[in-house]
Image: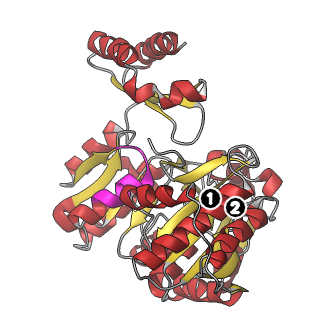
Amino acid sequence: MLKYFGTDGIRGIVNHNLTFQLAYNVGKSLAIYISKHKKSEIVIIGKDTRISGDMLTYAVACGLSDYGVNSKIIGIVPTGCVSYLSSKLDVGAGVMITASHNAPNMNGIKLINNLGYKFCVDDEIEIEKYIDKKITPKVKKGKIVNALDLVEKYINFLCNEVGCDLNGINIAVDTAYGSNYNIAEKVFKKLNANLVLINNDPLGEKINVNCGALNVKHLTQEVVRHKCQFGFAFDGDADRLIVVLSDGRVLNGDDILFVLGGYMLKKNKLNSLTVVGTIMTNSGTEESFKNIGVRLVRTDVGDRNVIEKMMQNNYVLGGESSGHICVASLNTTCDAILNALYLLKIVITENIDLNELLLHLKKAKQTIVNVKVSDNFRHSFDTNIQLKKSIASIEKQYPDIRIVVRPSGTESLIRIMVEGDELKSNVVVEKIKQVLV
């Protein structure tokens, strides 16, 4: 495990383990990396709505500036915007200041390369080598400029390349007080949708709290109350999408993956007849794909793992149950508003009844429980041989129950997922909780 980087960039509690100095040092390290690899000496920086976003943005920018690299600050945008612009502009890298779906007191730093992909582990290892080193700043400083106008390129891409006319379509959107609060409204209105917006203010102190992709109760109520055909929920940095249908039915990432996979299969766009999921993807989803002639391959949890598997094998579609979905032909990362528009375009142009289509998706009963543990326990999970033996013993006792136990990549939690008979699953969860205490 790296010292600073986790499963999705650097993440922590602001002014505790994520400080101005650390963010400055990340900027310094990124500048040194860019110089060493002879990349463009320009970095674009976006952020979500968290109150600490400005402090961390300018800390990174100051680190870049001191070591000769220019920053273009594009303000509050989704992660998908930073990835898109990083892949289209002549820049050395992109930075997204966000803690994604985590609580408001947390924040984070995601590094994105000049092709629009998140930095791989090898790149993060190199960045970490420079973070704690004392390296003399350059005499010639980089410039720090506001470049909010660049965001329009992303909005035009969404409307012109992915969107379609939504005239007469009622849509409810919950942006979780997060990074899509401005762009989502602009895009859906530009496409003529009748829009119901909730939790759509730039209030970083409320980001992800009982709203958005983590809690769709309010959105479901609004969809039914306003007779909306669709509801879309995003998380704080808008890389997760959860969908609510007109009858209040909630579609998670597995459901969305099945819909998109079926469409791409029909249109001969599904390379190798394969989609990528994770160890958390419902086994019923895997079986349902198999029934239509599509193979599902699994990776460890994390959208970066999904996308790396896609890149390695030229697969075009992958995702997680949590709502991370990547369509490789459209963007280099999981982009919730893009995926919402793509789903709408498919449904409208193909005249698809999603409820009817989803009759072909049969999912196993799945129970997910989070157990709070100390951070030391979480970090030592993968090397705790006795704990692994205890969990393996439980798995042996219940061969018909699929069990996944893993440490969270960002929080002091152990996540337990069991799949199968409900009564047996409840027993299994309690047994596992006992060995974690």
Q: Residues within 10 Å of mark 1 (few under 14, many from 20)?
A: many
The residue nearer to you, when weighing 13 against 279, is 13
- The percent coordinates of residue 61 (x first, y second) are 67, 73
Residue 76 seen in the current view: no
> Is residue 2 or residue 150 the one in the foreground?
2
Label 2 vs 1, first from the N-terminus? 2
Vertical placement of residue 391 versus 97, above or below: above
Q: Could you tell me the amino acid type at mark 1?
A: Phe
Q: Quadrant of residue 375?
A: top right
Taking the image as drawn, is residue 48 in sight?
A: yes
Picture coordinates of residue 26, whole percent (x, y): 59, 62
Label placed on residue 354: none
Label 1 sits on residue: 234
Residue beneath the point at 61% across and 50% down: 11
Against 89, is 369 above or below? above
Q: Residue at x 65, y 78 (%)?
A: 65
Residue 426 horizontal/vertical position (percent): 48, 15
- Looking at numbered disc 2 in the image, what kind of residue is underneath it? Thr
Label of residue 175 in the image: 2
Is the stretch drawn in magenta largely helix, strand or loop? helix
Q: Which residues are magenta?
A: 300-309
Q: Quadrant of residue 256?
A: bottom left
Q: Is residue 75 left or right of residue 44?
A: right
Q: Is residue 304 magenta?
A: yes
- Say if mark 2 contacts mark 1, CB within 8 Å: yes
Dot 1: what SS?
strand
Whether 127 is among the magenta residues is no
Q: Nearer the viewer, residue 243 or 184?
A: 184
Q: Point out residue 1 in the picture as x, y percentages from the top left corner.
A: 44, 41
Indicate left or right for 398 with 425 as reference: left
> How did the renderer colour the structure?
secondary structure
- Give the left or right position of residue 252, taking residue 271 as reference: right
